[in-house]
Amino acid sequence: MAGQSDTSAPILEVRDLKTYFHTRDGIVRAVDGVSFKVNAGETLAVVGESGCGKSVTSLSILRLIASPPGHNEGGQILFQGEDLLKASEARMREIRGNKISMIFQEPMTSLNPVLKIGKQISEVLVLHQNMNESQARTKAIELLSLVKIPEAQSRVDQYPHQLSGGMRQRVMIAMALACDPTVLIADEPTTALDVTIQAQILNLMRELRDRTGASIILITHDLGVVAEMAQRVVVMYAGRKVEEADVKELFASPLHPYTRGLMNSIPKLDEEKCARLEEIPGMVPSLREPILGCAFAPRCTHATGKCRTEAPDLEQKKSEHFAACWHSEKFLFGVRA
Amino acid sequence: MIQLRPLLEVKDLKKYYPIRKGLFGRVSGQVHAVDGVSFSIGQGETLGLVGESGCGKSTAGRTVLKLIDPTSGEISWRGKRIDGLSRVSMRPFRQEIQAVFQDPYSSLNPRMRAIDIVSEPLINFQKFSRSEGRDQVAYLFEKVGLRPDQMIRFPHEFSGGQRQRLGIARALSVKPRLIMCDEPVSALDVSVQAQVINLLIDLQKEFGLSYLFVAHDLAVVRHISHRVAVMYLGRIVEIAETPELFDSPKHPYTEALLSAVPIPDPALRRTQIVLQGDVPSPINRPAGCHFHTRCPYAQERCRKEEPGARELSPGHVVTCHFPVNAK
């Protein structure tokens, strides 16, 4: 399918991506064979706990992993048919911030503290859209009002430290949207924010998605945010994809024991009785040693001898529902535990 | 739910920080971090203290322990005033009130072994010898779900969740009655978070502990607390028993806060109340009700007159002129 550009093809396709870090203590297999597709106008959520490789995956797409120590060990990233892993650095500069842009978690550290925010937004426009300074400034003010920053006219000349956390995140979004990107990668966009501000930002992202029709890859650990934003979900564990399904399907009948554990371990606001939370025993495995068998086996209550020796492949268990587990049939017809 | 003689009683607690300017350090203003907070905690009870960043919940928690000296107000521990006590006269109370902090990375001394971290309070307060301490530490390790053979390790050799268990073991070592938990699970991953929450609940049942549970995560607070106090700009705007507060919040801020939490259920479609703007600065707070600038129901009176605390039903206190969901 590579090289084709028909409309049914996904906008972005990641195939068997492997990103390893060569450290003094050995090779860390941060992303170990991950594949997924993003269709036009779709929001895909990538969920997992810290160290599962979700952020490394997103940085790998834009080739933002520092090398050394990071190194791409294989796979393809096809953006509208073009393999980004083979693209030249000049070509990548054309794509970054223009065709594919990114919103980072830390709005405090990802903005330049010594540049006015207007200047930081116009930088992208001058570079990619051949605008002159004054055109870019006008457009920057327009973008600031688009992301609902009050008094955009005067805010445009402020520095990041003069803005609150929520406002800084809005500036990041304005910057990311400046060139009407085809794909927007949002890496934990609301994790550093308070809930009331998070609600504002999520609302804004939904509104802008409907308006621009951009595809969004939403990287998060918060299942609540996933449920409210995404259409399709990829669950990652220890550098691998363990489950993928439509959002409603995934929450209604999760098939991988890790996904099930994750869902049962979060306290819920609307639960009837405060029952004991389900724990996932143990902790995430070290990615330094090669993992034999299923990466989740040591923490899984359903694990058998086969799980410890043979890694399960991602298989289609139901229509549009994939899971990498030897025993997922157990959950296929049973009621949710 | 639990009606016992309060263990801890806090009345009109205030903590202001002066803002100094210029060469001579002239005081040009005050940060009203905690501004007249009152609550009580009974034996075996958990009081959740929630709010967004900068609302003063952590300062309130730390002031209660006298880790920060209060500007004014009363703190009574089992009927005795402790707010005016000196460091030395505070010492006996330190055993009874302990703390667990948010960041398990920075609250443990990286140069001390786990056994020394946990036995330090024992040697300090209860005059344990090193060998007696060792047995006690082994017992505590078992209680918090660590293996006794991990005692000789350094903090960096533990994972985040294990480090938080270590912090809990240290707090438990002197058999406290109350533990102030300041965001104890917010630095942990969800699967590990569940382990620590369950541990805290188990320990509470076993030792009859009380918790002052300071956190921003409403779902976690709901799960662990018997009563919940919601703070906004240094004040408690609503306090009630947990089911009551979550089922029928009376303060517009509580209502909005609850509706802002994303629910992990894609089939659920609900109407959200999205608050506009940011929390005002605790230096220049709005006149009248501090929440009126963001309140969807604000009226003229709210802009001028500060609301007083009102008990709408037994144990349910709200600071608002026009409470929502009021019968």
Image (cartoon, grey):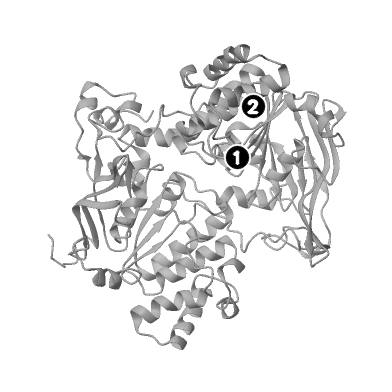
User: At 59% across and 42% down in the image, what residue appears?
Assistant: B218
Give the vertical position of A206 relative to B90 (above or below). below
Instruction: Give residue A294's position: percent from left, percent from top.
Output: 25, 32
A4 relative to A179, above or below: above
Q: CA distance from mark 1 to mark 2?
A: 15 Å
Q: Residues within 10 Å of mark 1 (few under 14, many from 20)?
A: many
Q: Quadrant of residue A298?
A: top left
Q: Which mark, residue B183?
A: 1
Residue B121 in the image, given as x and y percentages of width and height: 67, 24
**Chain under disc 1:** B
Q: Position of residue A81 (x, y in %)?
A: 17, 64
Query: Horizontally, is B189 left or right of A56 in the view?
Result: right
Q: Is residue A133 left or right of residue B10?
A: left
Mark 2 lies on residue? B171
What's the amino acid at mark 1?
Answer: Glu
Quarter that holds the C terminus of chain B? top right
What residue is drawn where x is 58% and y is 55%?
A196
Kind of residue indicated by mark 2: Ala
Quadrant the N terminus of chain B occupies: top right
Residue A248 at least partly seen: yes
